[in-house]
């Protein structure tokens, strides 16, 4: 069994990890978002997807584009694969070992849908 962890809250960089039930963690630090995250997930997909038990995503706080990307991917993977999804809210360093223990112990509740949590109001208007 494994869980896919997605963290895109840092501008210009992302982190994915495959958290395995036996305690092994395969972590990938990625420069960029969007396509870079999907490419990193694809690299290990054939190995880990057959044993995938759920999705874990950091929903924020973070910048609009950064958080939106990770949360979108988590919601899509969860919906299309029929897998449970778990939300982490946090700033600063998050320890993957602790997150794995929490999800295994049932301390991270399942979510049907996760909303992004931005660090400020989005600024998506056109300049005048």
Image (cartoon, helix red, strand yellow):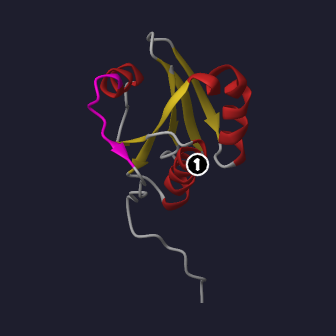
In this view of the protein, can residue 66 be seen by the observer?
yes
Residue occupying the far bottom of the picture: 128
Q: Position of residue 6 (x, y in %)?
A: 52, 38
- The number of numbered badges drawn on the structure is 1
Residue 10 vertical position relative to residue 19 in the rendered view, above or below: below
Q: Residue at x 49, y 73 (%)?
A: 123
Residue at 38% over, 57% down? 117
User: Start and end of the magenta stretch?
Assistant: 104-111
In this rendering, is residue 69 above or below 47? below
Question: Where is residue 48 shown, x and y percent of the image?
Answer: 62, 22
Q: In front: 81, or 127?
A: 81
| Along the viewing direction, whichever of 51 and 71 lies nearer the viewer | 51
Query: Which quadrant of the structure image shows residue 89?
Result: top left
The residue pinned by badge 1 equals 73
Q: 111 left or right of 14?
A: left
Q: Secondary structure at mark 1?
A: helix
Give residue 41's position: percent from left, percent from top: 66, 33
Q: Position of residue 53 (x, y in %)?
A: 49, 29
Q: Is residue 112 left or right of residue 81?
A: left
In the picture provided, is 30 more to the left or to the right than 42?
A: left
Q: Work out whether residue 93 or residue 55 is closer to the camera in this orientation and state it.
A: 55
Identify the residue at horizontal 38%, vertical 64% (top origin). Answer: 120
The quadrant in which residue 15 appears is top right
- Which quadrant does the C terminus fall into? bottom right
**Residue 107 in magenta stretch:** yes
Is 124 covered by the magenta stretch?
no
């Amino acid at each position: 069994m494994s869980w896919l962890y997605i963290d895109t809250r840092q501008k210009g960089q992302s982190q994915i990890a495959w958290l395995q039930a036996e305690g092994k963690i395969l972590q990938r630090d990625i420069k960029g978002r969007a396509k870079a995250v999907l490419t990193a997930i694809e690299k290990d997909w054939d190995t880990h997807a057959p044993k995938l038990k759920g999705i874990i995503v950091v929903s924020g706080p973070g910048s609009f584009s950064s958080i939106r990307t990770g949360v979108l991917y988590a919601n899509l993977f969860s919906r299309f694969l029929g897998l449970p999804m778990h939300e982490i809210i946090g700033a600063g360093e998050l320890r993957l070992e602790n997150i794995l223990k929490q999800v295994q112990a049932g301390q991270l509740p399942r979510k049907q849908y996760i909303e992004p949590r931005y660090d400020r109001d989005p600024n998506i208007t056109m300049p005048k």
